[in-house]
Image: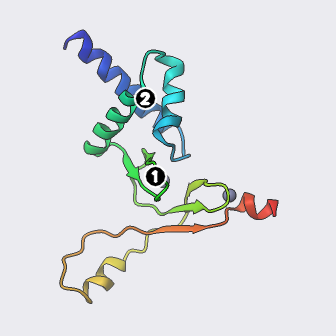
Amino acid sequence: MSSNGIKRSRQRERIYHVLRRTREHPTAEWIFERVREELPKISLGTVYRNLHVLAKQGMVRELDFGEGTKRYDAFLSPHYHFVCEQCGTVKDLEVAPLADVNERIQQLVPELIHAHKLDFYGTCANCQAAS
Ligand SMILES: [Zn+2]
Ligand SMILES: [Zn+2]
């Protein structure tokens, strides 16, 4: 591998490592700030590009909650997300995915269903305690 190739794969490995260590569902900017502590020369554009590659490889999930910026998740097991409308926190809901949703909808429509997406919105426990 060329030295450029080694540099590129090291950057990607650090980005993945940072994402793997958090349950915050961070944005690319958040990841950039962390990775920069170790690789000061890395650019935000490089972080975006690598996140895109990791998502295409199926290593990370890209999340879009309509905030105008994507968030990333390195935990791939099926789970639902909760978005706090007060503080913007995104967290994993500790509930099993609804197993029979796909089958129930499948009985009603001619389209062939293989997955569904469901996000929950409301007020997190912290914000409830603060009000
Ligand atoms: Zn909150
Ligand atoms: Zn998650």
On the image, the x and y values in percent for residue 13 come to 37, 27
Q: Quadrant of residue 53?
A: top left
Count of all numbered marks drawn on residues in the image: 2
Measure how far apart labels 1 and 2 are at the Cα level. Answer: 16 Å
Is 119 above or below relative to 33? below
Closest to the observer: 104 or 4? Answer: 4
Q: Amino acid at mark 2?
A: Leu
Q: Secondary structure at mark 2?
A: helix
Q: Which residue does the image show at 44% across and 46% down from the upper left?
A: 72
Q: Which residue does the image show at 81% across and 59% down from the upper left?
A: 130
Q: Which residue is mark 2?
A: 44
On the image, the x and y values in percent for residue 52 come to 31, 40
Q: Secondary structure at mark 1?
A: loop
On the image, the x and y values in percent for residue 121 come to 57, 67
The answer to whether residue 100 is visible is no
Pointer 1 or 2: first along the chain: 2
Ligand 2 lies under 8 Å from the Cβ of mark 2:
no
Q: Quadrant of the N terminus?
A: top left
On the image, the x and y values in percent for residue 86 come to 67, 60
Q: Which residue does the image show at 71% across and 62% down from the upper left?
A: 125
Residue 68, label in figure: 1
Q: Quadrant of residue 91?
A: bottom right
Q: Amino acid at mark 1?
A: Gly
Is residue 99 left or right of 91 when viewed as pictured?
left
Is residue 45 left or right of 122 when viewed as pictured?
left
Q: Residues within 10 Å of mark 1 (few under 14, many from 20)?
A: few
Q: Quadrant of residue 126?
A: bottom right
